[in-house]
Amino acid sequence: MTHAPDPLADLRSGFFVECAELLERLQDALTELEAAAEDAAATDPEVVNTAFRAVHSIKGGAGAFGLTALVGFAHRVETVLDALRDGAIRPRAEDVALLIRSADHLADLVSAGAAGTGAPDPAAGIEAGLAALVPGPRPEAAPAGTDAAHDNRPWQVAFRPQAALFASGNEPLFLLQALADLGATDIRCDFAALPRLAALDPEDSYLGWRLTLPATRRGAEIGEIFDFVEDVCDLTMERLAPARPTTTPGTERPAAVAETPSIRVDLDRVDRLMNLVGELAINQSILTQSLSEGGLDAHSALAARLETLTGLTRDIQDSVMTMRAQPVKPLFQRMGRVLRETAAALGKPARLKLEGEATEVDRTVIERLADPLMHMIRNALDHGLEPAEERRRAGKPAEGTITLTAAHRAGRLVVELGDDGRGLDRARIRAAAEQRGLIARDAPLGEAETDLLLFRPGFSTAGGVTDISGRGVGMDVVKTAITRLGGRIAIRSEPGRGTTFSLSLPLTLAVMDGMVVRAAGQMFVVPVAAILETAKLAALDRRSFGAEAALVRLRGAFAPLCDVAAALGMRTAGQTGAEAIAILTVAEDGSRTALVVDAILDQRQIVVKPLRGGFGRLPGISAATILGDGRIALILDPGELARLPGPGTGPKQEVA
């Protein structure tokens, strides 16, 4: 038996997308309220209004789709925000903290509604705390500029839904229920516009409603119920008793703020468009190379048109990349919740400071950054920040601060997560590594090498296993995830001052600048972002190191040589020709390696094609691309390539 498609599926999906935006606005507003409460500064009324409108909009949409748990909890939050808006209560730091926890639960309820699962229960104390802020019925504030004691005229509301109201998934019943909650009485259906049966259009709307509300209700309060549908219904609100023809205070709606027109597009469609643009770029490259091999005159009309096509292809590619780019703000805000929950579990007061949230990056990078950042924040709270009493003894505020920043630097995304804690205890790190057998007891390690032990699989300094740490996983997961993104990670730490982890990532996983090289007759691509310098191998100062390794001196320092073809098992080490090239690269841990190739062919923007299916994991290879002649070239991962077992460029090479 087949089920008919849900006609509201698209509207429901759109509602949850809008909820994500509304929750982001709510979080922004509560963050501003939190800062004002901490500084004992005056609260900007518009900030409270923004928070109220966000919750009210979520509540209204949830009612249209029968999400009763979400409607009920949103109503409780809305009541507190309404009291803040009217000045009935003053926002204290602890009250705003409660609202932030409530926003987290609203997000949980929205997620449960989107997934069609049962509504989760709120964390302990949230509902009781909200109820305590606004105990019992609260007298309604009079509209601005009026005296409620003298204005005892009840409200009469008349509204008639248009056909578009039903088409947008809204239901008059829920509007009537919301009005009933405000004390609406004498609710009557208006049949005046109902035509004869022969003229009735089943797709049109003919019924309306009239009802009366208490005089103590504010016009704005009534009007907010219709926020979602004001443009798809006929609505009038007026006082019943005769009065001079003036605009009733409180019924005015704020002027619309000019916004840039936008539309919502399914992300899958953007991805498909990106794939098509990638194919266009590949075919344009093939066409260019084919005409070049055919002896095309560089000054001919065809060459000029081909150059125009190349420019248009690049422009289209850049435009689509812009469509895929998203600010890191939603991701950073999610980390705020991770911090709050972890801090509560550990009993360590802490706050998250965000900088550069508007920085944009490919959405795929954002999605794959969530888990690494979550591990890093938990690790910073557990191991980086001291307990409150220890911080006081050190002359620090009892509340720790974790700072999360994002910025564009040299064509890459740089994300830094720093804490103002105790800093790395390198002696303890080394002792833990020795105890777990990760290093020899007499291994000579500097500060940088000791810090990198944090990323070794199985490493942990925790004294026992808890829900937060102690199982030897966490930072190695971070390193693996960042490496797979084509990124690098570095550590800065100062005892007593804190630790900062710096992540350097590509802005996109779809297109990159690469250097096309040849090794053992095969084409490879080295990411330009990883390259520091290139030089002829024969002209460099080379030295033997150990039994099978060699070093090369570049930029005043020695770096190990790695023959790309030998490391990938394509030839024996030391079989490079006289024209071999050394490419100095930097890995995610800051270490340098000189990759040895037979020749450098070109530098170009390439379309990244992930390796899927039966290829499996190819050590030293991050992805693939299609060159202008139609051949496939593998994209090298310089950091991993340098760590492959076996000789790279051994002692068979002549060392000057």
Image (cartoon, rainbow, N blue to C red):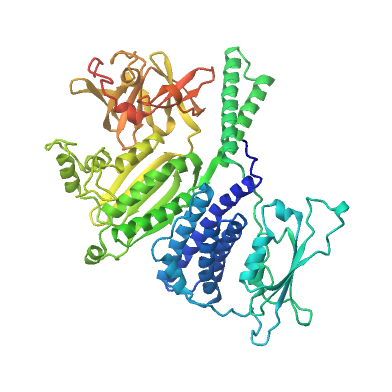
Quarter the N terminus occupies: top right
Residue ID at (37%, 38%): 481
Vertical side of 179 occupied by 325: above or below: above
**Relative to 115, does residue 651 appear above or below in the rendering?**
above
Q: Quadrant of residue 594?
A: top left
Residue positioned most to the bottom? 150
Q: Is residue 235 visible?
A: no
Picture coordinates of residue 524 (x, y %)? 43, 21
368 or 280: nearer the eye? 368
Give the total of numbered labels: 0
Residue 321: horizontal and vertical position, in percent?
55, 38
Q: Please name the residue shown 76% across and 82% down the image.
A: 241
Between residue 44 and residue 242, name the one nearer to us.
Answer: 242
Residue that lies at the very extreme toward the left in this rendered image? 442
Q: Quadrant of residue 646?
A: top left
Name the residue nearer the viewer: 245 or 586: 245
Q: Is residue 383 left or right of residue 328?
A: left
* Residue 207, image x, y percentages: 78, 61
Does residue 132 appear left or right of residue 444 in this picture? right
Image point (30%, 43%), residue name:
475
- Quadrant containing the C terminus is top left
Does 210 sit left or right of 538 as displayed? right
Q: Is residue 127 visible?
A: yes
* Vertical arrangement, residue 535 with respect to residue 202, above or below: above
Q: Is residue 471 above or below residue 246?
A: above
- In the image, is 482 to the left or to the right of 432? right
In percent of width and height, residue 254 lies at: 66, 67
